[in-house]
């Protein structure tokens, strides 16, 4: 375990996700269990709390969409496994919804600190609403942090995973407000001859603003409803 990460929780995009071996509501889990899949690893402040309950219900309803994108969900809070199970059961009894993804029991806060999910300026006993998106190679690709009193937008998390997959598959970038199947940004030229060629390309296809900002339709193999990974 990385001692500096353990003390400071200084996760960074592009680094290898810290490994873990944890107890969850669906049995023991390790980071290696998710190899070859995208993982949305998210924390919530506590069981039996109102905002967290709405998020768990929303994540559960959206779970089939995540699965279609070769993506798994993993929750965490600094609560016991027994508390997680009781909360899951309470949600089921009141809504008929069974949480289909594991929740990590992290009473010591070890994993929460390792992943920077505890903000000491906010609370030492609760995790903030962190979202860490890890790719199939175990690399951290996105880190999102929400405060205790603001629930997450699950469709935006889905869109973020879709955008990551499209960018990887198309060797491009996704623009602001990008949605699935929309054009992607072409990488900018690196030499002046390439710049001239790009300007000609834009004039002929009317698909850009300037040499440094032009678009292309995603490759046919990338235009899919994410029923399988690109």
Image: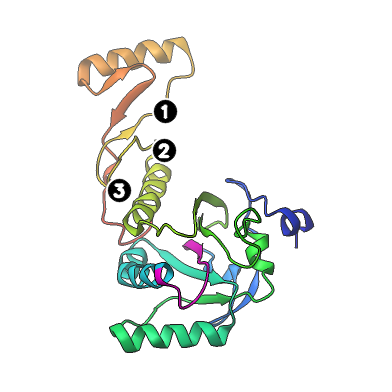
Q: In front here: 61 or 174?
A: 61
* Cα distance between the residues tagged 1 and 3: 19 Å
Whole-Å distance between the Cαs marked 2 and 3? 12 Å
Query: Could you say whether the residue bearing mark 2 is in a helix, strand or loop?
Result: loop
- Residue nearest the observer in this picture, 222 or 118: 118
Quadrant in the picture for residue 211: top left
State which mark lies toward you, 2 or 3: 2
Left or right for 103, reference 21: left
Residue 2 visible to the viewer? yes
- Frontmost residue, 60 versus 174: 60
Residue beneath the point at 59% across and 45% down: 14
Q: Distance between the residues labelled 2 and 1?
A: 8 Å
As helix, strand or loop, the secondary structure at mark 1 comes to loop
The residue that disc 3 covers is 221
Query: Which residue, given by chain and number where applicable, does mark 1 sit on?
Result: 187
Q: On the picture, is 109 further left or further right than 33?
A: right
Left or right relative to 201: residue 110:
right
Check whether the beta carbons of the residues at disc 2 and disc 1 lie within 8 A of each other. Answer: yes
Closer to us: 80 or 150? 150
Instruction: Look at mark 2 in the image and give the residue it sits on.
Output: 171
Q: Which of marks 2 and 3 is nearer the N terminus?
A: 2
Q: Quadrant of residue 215?
A: top left
**Residue at the image point whose x is 36% and y is 60% from the top:** 69
Indicate yes or no whether the magenta region holds residue 74: no
Does 55 sit above or below residue 215?
A: below
Q: Give the range drawn in magenta.
A: 36-50
- Residue 158 in the image: state x and y as whole percent: 35, 56
Give the class, few, some or many, for how many residues have Cα within 10 Å of label 1's Cα (few <14, many ≥20).
some
């Amino acid at each position: 375990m990385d001692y500096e990460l353990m003390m400071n929780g200084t996760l960074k995009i592009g680094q290898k996700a810290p490994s873990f071996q944890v107890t969850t509501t669906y049995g023991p889990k390790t980071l290696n269990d998710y190899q070859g899949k995208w993982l949305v690893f998210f924390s919530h402040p506590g069981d039996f709390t109102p905002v967290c309950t709405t998020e768990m219900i929303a994540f559960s309803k959206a779970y089939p969409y995540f699965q279609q994108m070769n993506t798994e969900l993993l929750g965490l809070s600094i609560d016991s496994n027994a508390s997680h199970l009781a909360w899951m059961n309470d949600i089921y009894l009141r809504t008929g919804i069974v949480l289909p993804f594991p929740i990590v029991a992290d009473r010591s806060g070890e994993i929460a600190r390792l992943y920077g999910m505890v903000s000491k300026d906010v609370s030492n006993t609760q995790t903030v609403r962190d979202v860490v998106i890890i790719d199939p190679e175990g690399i951290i690709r996105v880190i999102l942090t929400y405060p205790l009193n603001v629930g997450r937008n699950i469709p935006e998390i889905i869109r973020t995973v879709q955008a990551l997959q499209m960018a990887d598959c198309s060797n491009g970038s996704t623009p602001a407000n990008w949605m699935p199947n929309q054009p992607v940004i072409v990488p900018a030229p690196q030499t002046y001859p390439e710049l001239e060629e790009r300007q000609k390309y834009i004039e002929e296809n009317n698909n850009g603003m300037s040499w440094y900002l032009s678009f292309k339709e995603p490759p046919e193999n990338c235009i899919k409803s994410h029923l399988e990974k690109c």
